[in-house]
Each structure stands twice: as C-alpha cells, then as structure tokens.
Image (cartoon, grey):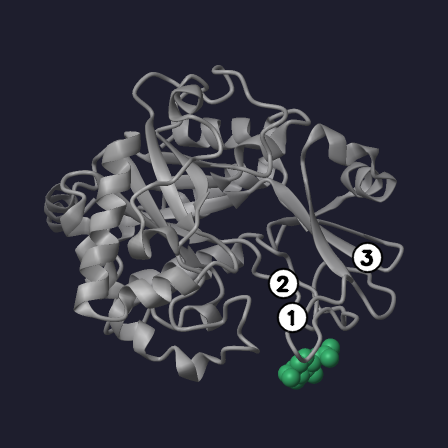
Amino acid sequence: MHPSSLLLAAASGASAAPVFAVYFEQWHTASLSDRATTAGVTHIITAFAQSTIFNSGTWYTPFMPLDQVRALFDDGTKVCMAIGGWSDTSGFSAGAATEQTRKTYAQNVATIMDNLGYDCVDVDWEYPGGNGQDYRIVPNDQKVQEVETFPLLLQEIKAAIGDRELSIAVPGKEGDMIAFTADKVPLISEAVDHVNVMSYDLMNRRNNETMHHSGIPGPARAVDLYIERGMEASKLVLGFTIYSKWFTTSGPCDGPEGCATAELERPDGTDTGLSGAVTFEKASYSDGEFAQAMQNGKVDEQGGGQWYWANSKLWTWDKPALITRKFDEIVKPKGLGGVMAWSLAQDSHDWSHLKAVREGVGGL
Ligand SMILES: *[C@@H]1O[C@H](CO)[C@@H](O)[C@H](O)[C@H]1NC(C)=O
C-alpha cells in the first residue's frame, strides 16, 4: 500500500473490523440458524419497519422481540432496524420533503431506537428519485426533488441518532442509481457509516434479455460506479443473495446471458407471473423444478454465476465457490468495508452460503 493511502485509510477508519451484516426478515423465521453458523456476524438488520411510521409515530413493534433476536447471535452483535424495503417508499418521500418533516422523521427514528434498544438503523429507500415498484403509477419526473432531499434526510437522521450507526441499502443497477449522482454521492458518503450495495437482482422483470442476477462483473461495476461518484470505498458493503431467481424465456436458451425473455412485466408495471425467486430454504427443495436446477446447475466462470435452463425457465444464482471469488475479486482489491447477506433464514437447506460468507470475512 502506498504511504499516502495508508494515511487516508487511517483517517477514514478503513482499518476497522470488516462489516459482516445479515438481514433477518419477517417472512422467514421458521427455521433459524444456530450461533455457530452466525459466529462473527457484526450487524443483524431486522426488516422491515414501514417507512410511514416515522412521519408521525413513535412506536413500532418488531416481528420478534429484540432480546430473542440477540440470543441468536454472538454477544455484542449490533442489532439494526431496517426501514422501508421494496415497494415501501411513501413515508420516505413525505419525510424527506421539507426541513420540518426531515427533523420530525429523524427525531422519531431516534426515539423508536431509544424505546426499543436498537444499536443502528438502516434506510432501505428503493429508490430515492424513482424506479420503485410504483414507477409506472408515480413516474420518476414526480420524484426529481428526492435527489436533493435524500442526502438531507440522511444528515438529519445521523444527527438525531448520535453515535449510533446509520447505513443505507442502495441499488446495484446503474439505471436505478438516480439519486446517486457525482454531485450527491459525496454528501451521502459523509452522512452514513455503511452503504449496503444490493449487488443482486441485476436481472429483474424489467429486463428483456437474460443475464446473471448477481454474478461477478455486475457487482464489481456497481461498486466501481459508487466509488467513481465519490463514495468512500471503506463504507461500501457488498451484498450477497441467498436465493435463486428464474425467468421465463421466449425460446430455447443455451447459456446464462442474452436469451430473449417472455413478457415479464406489463406496460402498467404489474407482474405477469413469468419470473420469480426461490430461497435456499429446506422447504424450497420440495419444488421439483427448483431441486432439478440446483442439482444440474452449471457454472459460468467468466460471468461468475451459476445457471440452469429447463422448461422455458432460466435459473440464476450464486454457489459458495462464487461467493468466495467475490471476496478475492471485489471486496479485497477494491478495499470495501465488508459484506452483507439477504437474508438469514433463507439458507436453512444447509447454511452453506452463509458459511461461505463467514469464511470470506475471516480471510479479510
Ligand atoms: C430489449 O429492449 C431493448 C431496448 O428496448 C431492445 O433494443 C432490444 O432489442 C430488446 N431485446 C430483445 C431480446 O427483445
């Protein structure tokens, strides 16, 4: 390392222990990991508190009492409250709008954290500036102001929560990085402690040709874009998924990339039901098509993804060996601050993905 980058690293706290964050969400709680599986997790992020709660309210009931959540992890693991998530943007839009609403929103976040004993908060606004679930109903041109107000809301929240950590979940697709301009990213970087890059779902129902939904070049590019626009690399946290996605193709398909898809989304933005996601839970393996894909999947070494095509469906997912490669090819060389996984209990089949992430963190 060049001496000047050593100085920079020291100044920015880059030498801090790597982040190993895991989302724990309300939809998967039946089959939980033991403490050996989650040893070393630094942040557990409960998901989700609705974004609208904080516009006026000061009470929120997590899906599991926090003492029960804490008992699943190492002593001292930070427990963070995730707000928002896919399709939940209206509270953020309203909360960010004016100086007064931002102050109220931030104060309510702090009060609820105090009341419940949360150590940290994670803002999952998908996405400031648009391209959310409602993008055909509320077009992006009605959200232009959010590009300005998003960093301001983050600044208010950070000021209100004192020395507790603020993280954000950010898009992996360049087209969704509407509020992450070279003008604004330095402000965002300054306001937050960690930036959880959703470096997956890079293929979704808005695509018309197949590609890996995560892979390696896509996440590497997402991280590079944030760094180029002024995000501190040591604040970036690379995301891993614990699910496979599938997409119906319009014809036969002999590789993971470039096959035309069937119509996956209608012009009004609704789902045609011709694509989906399946988690790596025990229960998923009772689905014959999923089990067949998992058994017969092929690795695309160049694209860094696992894939399988049968019955007009292209499956795309990450295997543990590919998770390991992302540490060597992205997390380490780019000097990232750590990694996160979505989500804990989706790996109940054999916990092999979480273990691969844990081993990768151990090698940082
Ligand atoms: C996908 O959409 C793009 C942009 O509209 C178009 O140029 C391309 O030909 C389409 N690909 C397929 C396979 O339909």
Residue holding disc 1 = 207
Q: Are marks 2 and 1 in contact (CB under 8 Å)?
A: yes
Q: Would you place residue 139 above or below residue 227 in this image?
A: below
Task: Work out how far the residue at label 1 is from the one at label 3, CA to CA, in angstroms.
Answer: 14 Å
| Quarter of the picture holding the N terminus | top left
Q: Earlier in the sequence, mark 2 or mark 3?
A: 2
Q: Is residue 22 left or right of residue 236?
A: right
Task: Work out how far the residue at label 2 is from the one at label 1, CA to CA, in angstroms.
Answer: 6 Å
Q: Is mark 1 within 8 Å of ligand 1?
A: yes
What number is the disc on residue 313? 3
Label 3 is placed on what type of residue?
Answer: Lys
Q: Would you place residue 220 above or below residue 161 in this image?
A: below
Q: Is residue 308 left or right of residue 350?
A: right
Residue 246 visible, this orientation: no
Q: Position of residue 146 (x, y in %)?
A: 32, 72
Asked where in the image residue 362 lies, by quadrant, the reply is top left
Regarding mark 1 in the picture, which secondary structure is present there?
Answer: loop
Task: Using a 10 Å C-alpha cutoff, classify the residue at mark 2 as few (fewer than 14 neighbours), some (14 to 19) or many (20 or more).
Answer: many
Q: Are marks 2 and 3 in contact (CB under 8 Å)?
A: no
What number is the disc on residue 92? none
Q: Is residue 170 left or right of residue 301?
A: left
